[in-house]
Amino acid sequence: MEKSINQILFVNRTPSEVWEYLTRPELMELWLMKNDFQPVLGHEFQFRHNPLPNFNFSGIVYCKVLEIVPLKKLSYSWKGGGTDGTITLDSVVVWTLVEKDNGTELQLVHTGFTDQLHPMVYSIMNDGWRQNTQKIPVLINNAKHDTTEA
C-alpha cells in the first residue's frame, strides 16, 4: 500500500513571493538543502545533505523537473538512496500554489512511500517537510523587512 505526505501551509504573501522560494536554488537552500535546481522542464538536479548512515541515506537526492506551471504548480521526481548507491525511495513531489485572500495556500503532496520502506522513513520525511516549509514564510518576512543597504 502506498502512503503520501499531504501538507498545506498558508503564507501571508503573494504566489510570486512564495514561488521564488520553490524555484531559486539559493533561496531553496535556505529552507531545504543545497541544490542545482533550475525551473526548466526535464532539468535533472540534486539536493545534497550530509550523509546519514544510521538511516542508510547517502545525502544525495536525485531529481528531475516533471511539470512546471509558473506561479501555480511545480513537480519533480525525488529519488534517494542508501550509502551503497542503491535507490531506496523513488517518489514524486508536487507543489501547488493557490492564491487566497491575503496570501497563498501552499500545498505539498509527496507520493511514493510503500510498505516495503521502513515506516520511519515516511515519518522522518513528513516531519522534515513540515519543519522545513514553515521556514518559508519566516524567510520571506525577514527578506521583506531587511532594512540594510547594500
Image: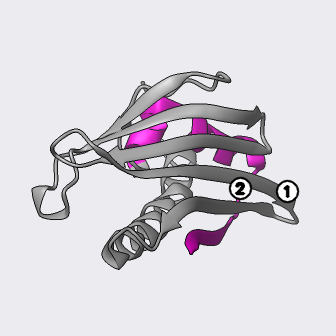
* Up/down of 75 relative to 132, above or below: above
Q: Position of residue 48 (x, y in %)?
A: 29, 38
Amino acid at dot 1: Glu
Q: Nearer the viewer, residue 117 or 47?
A: 117
Q: How is the image coloured?
A: one colour
Q: In the picture provided, is 31 more to the left or to the right than 111?
A: left
What number is the disc on residue 131?
none
* Within-10-Å neighbours for mark 2: few <14, some 14–19, many 20+: some
Q: Nearer the viewer, residue 72 or 21?
A: 72
Q: Position of residue 120 (x, y in %)?
A: 32, 76
Q: Quadrant of the N terminus?
A: bottom right
Residue under circle 2? 13
Q: Residue at x 74, y 41 (%)?
A: 16
Q: Residue at x 65, y 48 (%)?
A: 18
Q: Residue at x 46, y 64 (%)?
A: 129
* Within-10-Å neighbours for mark 1: few <14, some 14–19, many 20+: some
Which label's residue is closer to the chain start, 2 or 1? 2
| Extent of the magenta region | 1-30
* Up/down of 70 relative to 126, above or below: above
